[in-house]
Amino acid sequence: MNIRERGAAAAVRRGARRTAAAAVAVTLAAAAGVFALVGTMQSDSDVAASTSSSSSSSDSSSSDSPSATSSASDNSASSSSGLTSSSGGSTDSTSGAS
Amino acid sequence: MSTPVQPRTTAATDWRALGTGVRLVVTDPALLDSCNLLLARHLAEVDAACSRFRADSELAALDGTAGRPVRVSPMLAEALAVALHAAEATDGAVDPTVGSAMDAIGYDRDFTLVQEDDRPVRLTVKRVPGWRTVQLDRTTGTVAVPAGVRLDLGATAKAWAADKAAAMLAETAGCGVLVSLGGDTAVAGEPPAGGWQIRVQDVTGPVDETPAQGPYADVGLRSGGLATSGTAARTWHRSGHDLHHILDPRTGLPVRTLWRTVSVAAATCADANTATTAALVKGAGAETWLARRGLPARLVAHNGAIVTTPGWPLSACPAFEDEAVQAEGGSGGTAPGTAATTCREAAA
């Protein structure tokens, strides 16, 4: 291996070390973020509530796919609200009197 | 060419606090539990500050202050500011000084206990003291409540709490968040593909069960808030009277209104819920009042007729779109460009 090749090999090793160091830094930052989030949590015994159920959902509705009725005239949200026509996906929440 | 299908993954949890149902939905399922703990802490703080039913709450402590300015927590100061702003914005239709009137009709404890209570009530027409009697100084963080005035933040506090919770969780977790407190819904962060899907109906219920009674409509929400108020829920019977919790500040009694359910979308859930409550109190002509403020709304009359204002998705009332007609103006007439549209929806 000549001098030029040894130099190239050293550069590759340096690059690899930097990449590894950067990966460690990113991992630590992500972990710190999670811990920061968890660290601010407190289970408050005063809260008169308990988690009764949880669920997750995953569907493949498209933001562009119209519902059966969305071919109607576009009467979308005013500038003061984020209201849009339904995309026809699964219901995230209901809003009624309570 | 087919439209590319985008994945849509969310996680949700349901529980109870503040005397109502809590629903939290996030777009990053891995963060659901963490966000839920933060939400529980937030709602505990709101309850300690704003509850009318806890003797140890900050709000209850104001009852004995007899008009003396007292310092309150930033949490209560903000909740009071929202309530007073709502009163001003609605010309007093939404008034936080209805506390004594609520007590008088029997709603002086957690609602589950109200339903079990059988003490007689006597209905008396009496205008509430009025929001202008309450002096809030945000600079010093003090509030003065005259003797005999009891505050009730029920018309604004839950919606405001949902706004604060959604914003805080979205910023902390970095994902899309929906917080619903009894149907008062606030969203923040990047919404899921297609936006948050919300079904408006007479009474807040499970997402996987369409209402057994009454019309409903599905809409999308990408930001801000959506609230629904009505007289179909939180009702009780006492001394021969059918009562509910939406009071008319002019009489101190449950409002007798044209509408049974009003839904509004706005920049915040607090603004939306202020508008829904005001619409119930204003009755006929409320659709014009809402339209003039640029608020997309859906109003359901007791006879099932549905009126929407500009901005409310017409596809949410699909059955008779071709027959949509301009509604007659309300009591104040219909302003140009703000006409409400009547439509009917397929009942369940």
Image (tube, coloured by chain):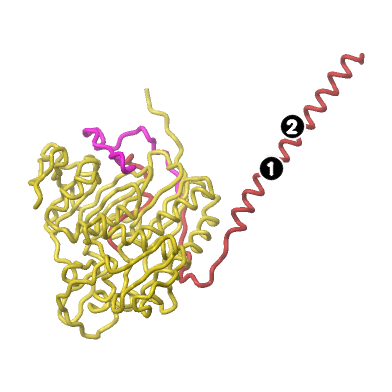
Chain colours: A red, B yellow
Question: Which one is in front, B308 or B133?
Answer: B133
Q: Residue furthest bottom?
A: B119
Give the labeled residue for mark 1.
A27
Question: Which one is in front, B42 or B84?
Answer: B84
Callout 2, which amino acid?
Thr
Give the crowd class for mark 2: few <14, some 14-19, many >=20 residues within 10 Å. few
Question: Which one is in front, B75 or B226?
Answer: B75
Is B75 colored magenta in this rendering? no
Q: Is residue A89 above or below residue B108?
A: above
Q: Is residue B61 above or below residue B78?
A: below
Chain to which mark 1 belongs: A
Residue B245 picture location, percent across and down: 25, 69
> Which quarter of the figure has residue B262?
bottom left
Residue at 45%, 50% in the rendered image: B167
Give the crowd class for mark 1: few <14, some 14-19, many >=20 residues within 10 Å. few
Residue B115 picture location, percent across and down: 28, 77
Give the labeled residue for mark 2.
A19
Contact (Cβ within 8 Å) of mark 2 with mark 1: no
Q: Is residue A36 left or right of residue B126?
A: right
Callout 1, which amino acid?
Thr
Q: Main secondary structure of the magenta part?
A: loop
Residue at 52%, 49% in the rendered image: B29
Magenta-tinted stretch = A57-85
Q: Is residue A52 visible?
A: no
